[in-house]
Amino acid sequence: MELMEQEMGLREKSRSTVLDAMIDFTGGTIGGIVTVYVGQPLDTVKVKMQTFPTLYGNAVQCFIKTFKQDGIARGLYAGTVPSLAANVSENAVLFCFYGMCQKIVSFVTGTQSVEVMSPLENAVSGGMAAFFSSFALCPTELIKCRLQAMREMATRGQQEGGLERLKIGPFGLTREILKSEGILGLYKGLTSTFMREMPGYFFFFGGYEISRHLLTPAGKKKDEIGALRTVVCGGIGGVSLWVAIFPADVCKSRIQVQSVAGTKPPTFLQMFFGILRNEGIGALYKGLGPTVVRTFPATGALFLAYETTKKYGNSLADYLSGG
């Protein structure tokens, strides 16, 4: 009898872990979709300024010129399909593994439950989860960056086909890369992605959890701070991420945009020190302004969508299990 009770307990624990992972995965998916539609125009500006820093004086000029030349769909929202794929896959995997890594960290540190983990423990969990999400992010991020910078590449004579290549689209570009470079061609910039994602999401989740801790009213739980404060906390987490890792993002964007079939892309360190030596430290922060402006509402919306989905998902799971 005791053995049967232990087996039932293990099954419930396993089922709970699977359900939690599914809820986190769904929350990350919905959050990723919201993030793209809120922040894509300024993400396009960021990539253009990172990869071609001498073409635009500032973010406003880049935004207006892009809008005039290519409009909204092919200009400011260029790369939206791969960006959706990137953000949905990254955030779905990120938040799914974030929940799992929280449980691992909670077990290792002897914390009673995930709900009472410290901001530092949550930050460590986020950094660990980012290792796994990087594999989902890198290929779609590469396609997105190349589409966003395609006009500049064409006008500078750095790609075959000239402006006609603006019509290629995300699926055509993916097929082209797979045909000429194989699956590894989609993972150019993976090292830079690790260098960006793992420390970045340490600060991302750390900033978010510290903000939630500070903004939680006395006598309430951090899950009860309301929509507005959740958006503010998410925005702070997003800004913390980008300020911390922006130089790594500049290197990643340039490696992915400049790498072409038949050429060996520079390593992360080669790109980093090359920019530092030839263009100065300011080039490593080119595009930070529009990124911060984009990030605050985008990541605020991400966490609001995630927390809301998780809240209703947990309620539904409790109802179905009779809890």
Image: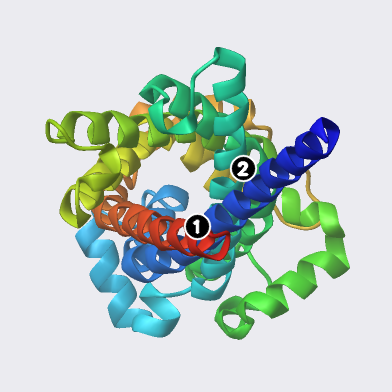
Q: Quadrant of residue 116?
A: top left
Quarter in which the N terminus is drawn? top right
- Look at the image and tell me whether residue 195 can be seen: no
206 or 250: nearer the eye?
206
Position of 257 with respect to 314 (left or right) is right
Give the vertical position of 103 relative to 144 (above or below). above
Give the vertical position of 304 relative to 98 (above or below). below
Q: How is the image coloured?
A: rainbow
Q: CA distance from mark 2 to mark 1?
A: 21 Å
Position of 211 with respect to 84 (left or right) is left
Q: Amino acid at mark 2?
A: Phe
Q: Secondary structure at mark 1?
A: helix
Position of 1 with respect to 293 (left or right) is right
Q: Secondary structure at mark 2?
A: helix
How many numbered marks are there? 2
Q: x, y percentage for residue 201?
A: 47, 35
Q: Which residue is mark 2?
A: 97
Q: Earlier in the sequence, mark 2 or mark 1?
A: 2
Q: Which residue lies most toward the top here? A: 109
88 or 158: nearer the eye?
88
Q: x, y percentage for residue 45?
A: 35, 60
Q: Which residue is painted at 68% across and 46% down in the image?
A: 12
Mark 2 closeness class: few <14, some 14–19, many ≥20 residues within 10 Å = many
From the image, state whether disc 2 or disc 1 is nearer to you: 1
Q: Which residue is painted at 59% across and 67% down in the image?
A: 85
Q: Amino acid at mark 1?
A: Asp
Q: Which residue is mark 1?
A: 318
Mark 1 closeness class: few <14, some 14–19, many ≥20 residues within 10 Å = few
